[in-house]
Amino acid sequence: LDPELMFQPALKSEAHAIRGLSYLGQRSEKHAEEEFLAALTAAETARAYAGYATLKILQNKPDQAHEYADKAIYLSGGEFGLIVKGNVYLSQGNYKNSK
């Protein structure tokens, strides 16, 4: 999966976001952040914001996580963002709002 071979900005963004999620799975936050920023530079997509919000949860930065989750909700109509938004609330111990 080489984002540089993708010419449509949205596809390039998706490829970088998927790579960022892969790096999160490997616990490589630095590489994940680089990929999410590259994704958002290519095009603002819901998957890129949702991934970046997930990274911010892991970095214990809930305010930024909420901001990026809200952008993912807006761009996706809820598909990606609502799950991440619930995870942000869960990470803060707010079980009521995580539903």
Image (spheres, rainbow, N blue to C red):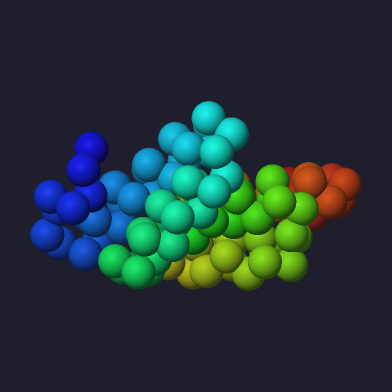
Query: Which quadrant of the structure image shows residue 48?
Result: bottom left
Find residue 38 and report its horizontal and vertical position in percent: 36, 61
In the picture, measured across the screen, residue 45 lies left or right of residue 8, that is right
The residue lying toward the viewer, choosing from 93 and 54, is 54
The residue lying toward the viewer, choosing from 86 and 99, is 86
Find residue 78 and report its horizontal and vertical position in percent: 50, 57
Find residue 11 and report its horizontal and vertical position in percent: 22, 55
In the picture, measured across the screen, residue 57 lies left or right of residue 55, that is right
Is residue 57 among what the camera can see?
Answer: yes
For the point 53% across and 31% down, the residue is 25
View extreme (top): residue? 26
The residue lying toward the viewer, choosing from 75 and 11, is 11
Instruction: Establish if 26 lies above or below 94.
Output: above
For the point 87% across and 47% down, the residue is 93
Q: How many marks?
A: 0
Instruction: Establish if 18 lies above or below 89.
Output: above
For the point 76% across and 53% down, the residue is 60
Is residue 50 among what the camera can see?
Answer: no
The residue lying toward the viewer, choosing from 12 and 91, is 12
Q: Quadrant of the N terminus?
A: top left
For the point 29% across and 47% down, the residue is 15
Find residue 79 and report its horizontal and vertical position in percent: 47, 52
View extreme (right): residue? 93
